[in-house]
Structures are given as C-alpha cells and as structure tokens.
Amino acid sequence: MKKLLMIFALTLSFVFTVSANTSSERAIQGLKNLNLKPGTKFTIFAEDITIKMAKVNAKEFNRLTGHKLIPKEAPFLEHRTKILQDAMGKRGTYDIVFLQTSWMGDFYNTGYLEPLTKWVNKYDPELDDMVAPFNKVWSSYAGGVYGLPTDGDTWILYYRKDLFEDENEQRKFKQKYGYNLLPPRTWDEFDDIGEFFNRPSENLYGATEWRVKGLTYPWFIQRLGSLGGNYFDNNMKATINSEEGVRGLRDLKNMNKYMSKDVLSYGYVETLAAFSQGKAAMLITWPAAGKNFVDVKASKVIGKVGYTTVPGYIVNGKHNPKTMNFPGYSLVVNSKSKKPKEAVYLVAQWLISKEQMKRANMNLSGNTDVIRKSIFNDKEMRSIFKGADHYFDAQKANIAQGFPDLILPGNDEYMQALEIEISRYMTGEINSPKKALDNAAKKWDKITKKFGKDKQLRLYNALLDSYYN
C-alpha cells in the first residue's frame, strides 16, 4: 500500500509538472532534449517590418538555449519572391519563414511547408489561446497544421477624437447633415464625415487610405463582403463583378474626393504619415499603426485618436459591417531546412509563446498585432499607452466582424488580376466599375480552371467553413 501511495504521489507530481509548463518552457526543454551542437544557427526570414518580432526576441533565445537565432529580411514587395526562389531552388536558405497566410496554398503545392501536426500534438503551442478564427484558419491547411500564427491582422477605424468631440464641429455637422457627429457606423455616415472634414486649404482631409497600385484590393473586398457579396458562387464562378461588387468599387473611388490629390500613390507609410501629422480625420488600417500614433518623435495626434470598428452597409434592413482580416502571418518550417525539423519547429513554438509574443506586441516600433487572448486581457499590455484599453477592444471587435482573405492556391494571381483592373478604374483608364470587375472575373475563372475547379471549390468551402464555424 505504501508503495502504491508513493507511485500515486509521483504520478501526481509528474502531471502537475507537465501541466504547469508553458508553451515557451516546453519548447526550450524540447530543444535541450535534442542535444544539438552548441551554437546551432536558426535562420528566420520576413519582410523588413515584421522581422522586428524575431529581432526583439533573438537575444533572449540565444541566452536560454546557447544557440543563435539569425533574422534575415527583405523589402515588403520582395518578400514573396525571395521565399519562392528558396522553394523552387530547394535551397533550404531559411529554416523558419513568416508566411502570409493567403500564400499557404501556393507554398503547400511547392512542397515547401513541413507538416507540424505531430509536434503541435506533442508540445502544445496553446493555439486555443489565440483568437478565433485565426487559431484555426491561419494554422491549418488541407487537413493538417502547417503554420503557427503570429499576427492578429485586422483593421481599425482610427478617427480624430479631438475633432469629433469639438462642440463647434458637432453643431455645424448637425446643422448640415441632420444627425449627431459620432464615429460612423455606416459607409454613408463615413462619407458624410469625410466630406465635412475635407478642408484642403487647412491642410486637412476627410480621410486617408491606401490607393497605391498593387495593394488596394483589400479595401474593395471588405466593402464587397459588407454588401453581402463574396469571392465565388457555389460552382466556383467568380462573383466579384456582382451588383454588390460594382457598388463597392464605385463607392471606394468616390471616397477619393475627400482625400489628398496624391492619394493614388499612398500606401502604408504615406497614410500613416498623413494621419500622424494631423492631416486626415479618419484612417482605416492595421492595429500596428495605433502604436505609431503615440510616438512622441513622429506623431502630432497623441491623445487625440479614437478607435472603433470599420463601418458597414445596410443590407435588407440590417447593419452588416465587415472588416478585412488581412493578411496575417504564420511561422512555417521549411521542409528543405538542413536543421532537424523538430528543432526548427520548437524554435517557432518558442517565438509564438505568450512571453515572446507579448515582448513583440509591446514594441511600439514593431508591427506585430496581438493575437493571443491572454495578451488581450493582460493588464500591463492594456496600459501600454493612454487609451490602449479602447484600442485593444476595437481590435477585438473588428476581428469579430471579420471577412476572410482568400487562402487558396493562386491567391497572388487572383489578387493581382483584380488589382490591375481596380487600378485601371482608379486612374480613369476604365470609366466603368462593372467593366473593370467583369475583366477581373474573367481572369479569375481562368485561374480557377488552371488550378482545377473541383479542387479549388473544396478548398474554398473548407475555408468558409473553418472561418465561420
């Protein structure tokens, strides 16, 4: 009996020890158990902003393990090309890659992605602590786990709280439009407010938003979704040229009237600069921007920014707001890495554990957005700057009303085909939004045929099911 009690006590002790371990501790212990050569180098690759997540954690990793984390980077527009070159050449240049989740299908098809399911089950990276649907949609593909999500990419509507709360502005707005000046719930209200605050002579515009050729399509897609539209129908025929799509694209261009005359050259840097310098009343962009707006060295709007959800259209009498959850990054393990794949996986798990994610999330110059529920609720995180609690609440609310990115093989081809036609419409080369979207839809149907209609349909339905269910 005494012997049985001792065994029972030891068992309880073991269970307690295992359950007390964090994802981070399990990863470090796993690396130690593999008995790697001291000083083993693990190369991690990302574009030149996202790589900060690895950079702020590299020193701690090196200290804990005796190995070396080597961050490598490329400009944003060269990021995909560099990974593709590594995949096609089967070089194993990078061990871990920050991969946009929309590219998962393409790189899965190249054989670049190492399956992670067995190690996820063995070491538990605590994916259930990540906000849904990102915990599943951004980690899984074709029935297995291939990525560890790092970034809670969604959008927030930022607005100039000082302007919206000014009694004189409120009085004038109500006189003109007949309702109170509040953060917009609908796109019609957004347009009214944009028109109201559009004062070029005062160096103030109603809004600022991406229009640079190459990456305007997500702002169109979220309007398409809000109007009740979608990418494809039940037979995998493109529906971006539906009535909903045509209205969404027309409204997107109409918005240009209350933005800078140079808006067609505006991307992330330009929109960020315009808003932080007090030159725009509203901006829809990623959560990372919010940390830049409290930078005493670069921002003129400190303490003047409000945070809320992206507006929506009224569809069949109901408010239907949608926020584009895009692009999202996951850490993937290069199947051609020359390091033991289990070790590479464990490095990735350590990086996406709560402690390391929090360190990256608290970096005000970084762009890693919160994705773990435990960090959203962390008191220190929620007080990182004045108003941070409202900022994080807005991020969560936008995730909750999210619209999915198209995670399918050929994503880049689909979106570049769409982007080309949107750009032609924005510049006036094509005067009709219907014609522009008809052109894009024809190209989409050809791309679908190229990858196999039935296969694409299965993957598309799986995406929607995973996202909404």
Image: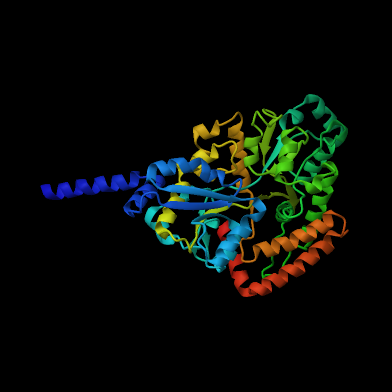
Q: Residue at x 77, y 60 (%)?
A: 420
On the picture, is 64 further left or further right than 466? left
Q: Residue at x 81, y 28 (%)?
A: 169
Say whether residue 231 is visible: no
* Percent x, y of residue 35: 32, 53
| Coloring scheme used | rainbow
Q: Residue at x 77, y 35 (%)?
A: 281
* Percent x, y of residue 270: 74, 42
Toward the viewer: 280 or 63? 63
Residue 198, relative to residue 97: is it above or below?
A: above
* Percent x, y of residue 29: 34, 48
* Percent x, y of residue 401: 63, 49
Residue 225, relative to residue 108: is it above or below?
A: above
Total marks in image = 0
Say whether residue 83 is visible: yes
On the picture, is 429 further left or further right than 348? right
Q: Residue at x 11, y 47 (%)?
A: 2
On the picture, is 441 further left or further right than 117? right
Toward the viewer: 469 or 389? 389
On the picture, is 67 further left or further right than 137? left
Toward the viewer: 259 or 173? 259
The quadrant of the rendering that contains the C terminus is bottom right
